[in-house]
């Protein structure tokens, strides 16, 4: 690839932590500009230094407040922090951008903190990939901890969270079917459980049910037993900060565990597998769709389907024969 | 394609409304069995008769209760009904299967009602496609109305809802940022708004804000103005059933509008476009991933990425060159 001096300069500035350059690249990633893809190719070798922490849970579980407090906790330890708030719920919430601005303002004076949000644009896929690439940007900027915050509903969020080394699942008492939910698959992705708003009714029950489920769960391949951390009311300073310190400690502890047991590589490989899937979707499927759309063939084919002259799978097989070797 | 007499008999039975055969096919679709794909190819020409109604909204908006009541309302009009409950929120709720069973029991005696649920399985994509195909099965069974119920968060749900002719968005007062949400994209997909639990505080405000937003919205290409339907407390029989009749009427009215204005074809084409996208993902990308995984190349490539010897896009381009003409 020929070196482009202007691009080289931009990347140098991103690696130096330039907020404006990094923000612009993340915006270009959202907009799927080809230059963003080129930039990620060049950034990739300079990544891998950050500890990526996924923070997920139902809407209303208090994730944003928690992430805010964690920023402060990590900054006290002089760690630099990146936060990526991913909001794939575009049709029903428009809150991400607003929350982003509010948080940015609070940390605007601190060059050790970089906060960005991503929202869904366009129709098909791409958000998980954009999120993964935005994490690479923050990683290349030299952020020590990168928190990826997402609403824990849906498959795409699971894909996003697969980009993390450590997954924190935030639960709150009184949301209903928590344990049902835990049985249904959450066990597989959580490294740390947080029982947030633990001063509420139902906290003790949630914790005891969670403990019971964890006791029945097989040990992870990494030999890690997910801790359950209680966090009190955010407006009740003492218990909140106690729980918070414990959480910050558990997050660091999980990473140390991965390193000490030699299983960090496995996590990295899993993370990488997800990235390959996403890059293949982008590199193989997207250009075919673009070609079909621009040539007008997509419209013609749709017409044939509406008239029931054929079916979608037969069409897809015809197209596959033309494009695949 | 050679005729397989056993498959022909199965399809004949599905078209005759056989619940056991249809259920088995839907299960095979979830499990992505090749025979399910073959069956859909043969079923497709026999579809297109049903009115597909997407019902979406935030968790807790009361969609399931509403769908249950709509089943009864449509049955009173002697329409046959299919219901597909899609629950892509697997990591955090496990409720779909349970709800399915409860509902099935209630309507078990009525051969005019067929209820099934789909949940996420496996890691990558496929739920929207399985949902679309399950709708085809119910369509081929001869169901007059097919309701597809999904939690309205995330892109995948928007894809699922794109399989509908009529989209009903269910809101409830006091959930917070409803109007923010409406501005953020919901306008584009809703044909009918329901303000559910309209006896609650905040209902009047929600309705007036919704009306204001609707008044500012440009007219749809189909010249349809989404009505706002108030539905009271499910346990307060009179206002609930009034709102419900109005909703059932609006759903039928929207379909009539599409037919009368000649825009049903446009909806069908949009629906079809989504299906082509999904079939291409299934037919082009999935076999490549399978090949890479089974040959062990995926592992080798992941290892190179972990060592930062290359980047995901360069890898994807190499693979694309090998597989694409």
Image: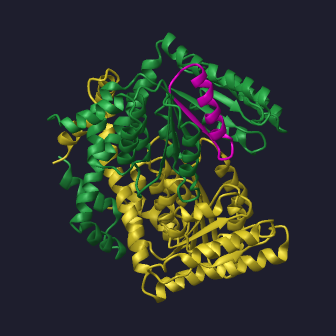
Chain colours: A green, B yellow
Left-right relation of B284 to A160: left
- Residue most extreme to the bottom: B260
- Residue most extreme to the front: A109
In the depicted view, which residue is nearer to us: A146 or B170?
Answer: A146
Residue B134: in magenta span: no
> Quarter-wise, where is residue B274 in the image?
bottom left
Residues in magenta, as a range: A53-80
Can residue A261 be seen here? no
Q: Position of residue B64 (x, y in %)?
A: 69, 61
On-image quarter of the N terminus of chain B = bottom left
In the depicted view, which residue is nearer to us: A317 or A202?
Answer: A202
Q: Position of residue B65 (x, y in %)?
A: 73, 63
Q: Position of residue B202 (x, y in %)?
A: 77, 66
Left-right relation of A309 to A139: left
In the depicted view, which residue is nearer to us: B82 or B250?
Answer: B250
Instruction: In the rendered view, tell whether residue A130 sits above or below residue A145.
Output: below
Q: Position of residue B270 (x, y in %)?
A: 40, 70
> Quarter-wise, where is residue A103 in the image?
top right
Q: How many marks?
A: 0
Q: Which residue is found at the position 75% from the left and 45% from the top?
A: A176
Q: Which residue is found at the position 30% from the left and 73% from the top?
A: A304
Left-right relation of A137 to A90: left
Residue A59: in magenta span: yes
- Residue most extreme to the top: A260
> Quarter-wise, where is residue B196 in the image?
bottom right
């Amino acid at each position: 690839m020929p070196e482009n001096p202007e691009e080289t300069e931009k990347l140098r500035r991103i690696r130096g932590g330039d907020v404006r350059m990094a923000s612009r690249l993340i915006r270009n990633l959202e907009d799927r500009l080809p230059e963003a893809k080129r930039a990620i190719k060049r950034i990739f070798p300079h990544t891998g230094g950050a500890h990526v922490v996924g923070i997920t849970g139902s809407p209303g579980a208090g994730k944003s407040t928690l992430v805010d407090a964690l920023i402060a906790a990590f900054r006290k330890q002089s760690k630099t922090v990146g936060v990526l708030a991913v909001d794939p719920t575009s049709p029903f919430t428009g809150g991400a951008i607003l929350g982003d601005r509010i948080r940015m303002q609070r940390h605007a004076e601190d060059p050790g903190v970089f906060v960005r949000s991503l929202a869904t644009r366009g129709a098909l896929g791409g958000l998980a990939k954009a999120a993964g690439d935005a994490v690479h940007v923050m990683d290349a900027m030299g952020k020590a901890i990168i928190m990826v915050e997402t609403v824990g509903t849906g498959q795409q969020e699971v894909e996003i969270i697969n980009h993390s080394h450590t997954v924190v699942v935030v639960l709150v008492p009184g949301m209903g079917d928590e344990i049902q939910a835990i049985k249904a698959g959450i066990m597989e992705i959580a490294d740390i459980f947080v029982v947030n708003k633990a001063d509420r009714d139902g906290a003790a029950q949630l914790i005891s049910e969670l403990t019971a489920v964890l006791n029945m769960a097989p040990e992870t391949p990494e030999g890690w037993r997910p801790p359950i951390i209680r966090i009190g009311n955010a407006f009740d300073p003492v218990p909140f900060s106690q729980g918070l310190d414990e959480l910050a400690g558990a997050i660091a502890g999980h990473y140390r565990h991965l390193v000490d047991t030699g299983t960090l590589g496995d996590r990295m490989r899993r993370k990488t597998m997800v990235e390959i899937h996403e890059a293949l979707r982008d590199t193989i499927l997207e250009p075919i769709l673009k070609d079909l759309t621009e040539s007008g063939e997509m419209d013609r084919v749709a017409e044939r389907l509406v008239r029931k002259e054929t079916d979608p799978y037969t069409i897809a097989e015809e197209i596959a024969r033309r494009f695949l070797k």
